[in-house]
Amino acid sequence: MNNWISAFLLFAVTKAGERKTSNDPLEDWMFTELKQCDKPPPVHEGYGCTSYLWNYELINLELFNSDPAIIVYRGLVPKNHIKSFITDITGAQKKARADSNGPRHADEITMDHTAKAGAARVFRRLSRFIPFIDFTASDPWQVLVFKEGGHFAPRHEYLKINASSEQDELTKTFGNRFATFMILLKEPGKGGDQM
């Protein structure tokens, strides 16, 4: 198991699906999110929903898998940050549409982490609340805006390299790393999948 997952498990203070009465940190979770914890217990008892304090803020997350690590943070980025990021994306999307040729299932927008105010706010927040990932070493934002009914299947791209001779310079410098980090900015109103 990775060291950062071990460190994370030290923060785990609630069992999967456990609910308390008043003054419970899980009260901050939406009902639909808590309902996911009512499913059959996960294969590994350490997986499930938990909450912890970091930088004086409550962090809600779910651990889905340890290798590759699949972690879902709930409500990590405030709605006003998301709104300003979507405003940045909308402006970039208009430019992308003007430059496109032919029908598209999704608009793909690429922008630097701090290129616009909304993008920078989200980037700084993620960097502050997920300190075990060096987001400065990552690729720029790649934003996919889907048309109604269009989506790609969820995926992860975990870099599994056995021999050190096969490792690129980034892996030698930074170790194994995430190749995909997804943020759901807006749920679809109709059709498609929420990505």
Image: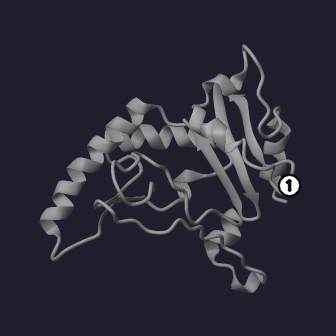
- The answer to whether 59 appears left or right of 126 in the picture is right
Q: Which residue is drawn at 78% across and 84% down?
A: 163
Q: Position of residue 52 (x, y in %)?
A: 73, 30
Q: Where is residue 133 in the image (x, y as percent from the top left)?
A: 64, 51
- The answer to whether 146 appears left or right of 161 in the picture is left
Q: Which residue is drawn at 63% across and 74% down?
A: 169
Check the image and report above or below for 52 versus 48.
above
Quadrant in which the N terminus appears: bottom right
Helix, strand or loop under label 1:
loop
Depth check: 153 or 40 in front? Answer: 40
Q: Where is residue 27 in the image (x, y as percent from the top left)?
A: 65, 23
Colour treatment of the image: one colour
Q: Pointer 1: residues within 10 angstroms few (<14), some, or many (20+)? A: few
Depth check: 100 or 137 in front? Answer: 100
Q: Which residue is drawn at 70% across and 71% down?
A: 172
The quarter of the picture where residue 18 lies is top right
Quadrant in which the C terminus appears: bottom left
- The answer to whether 43 appears left or right of 195 in the picture is right
Check the image and report above or below for 26 versus 96.
above
Q: Residue at x 20, y 62 (%)?
A: 96
Q: Mark 1 points at which residue?
A: 44
Check disc 1 and give the amino acid type.
His
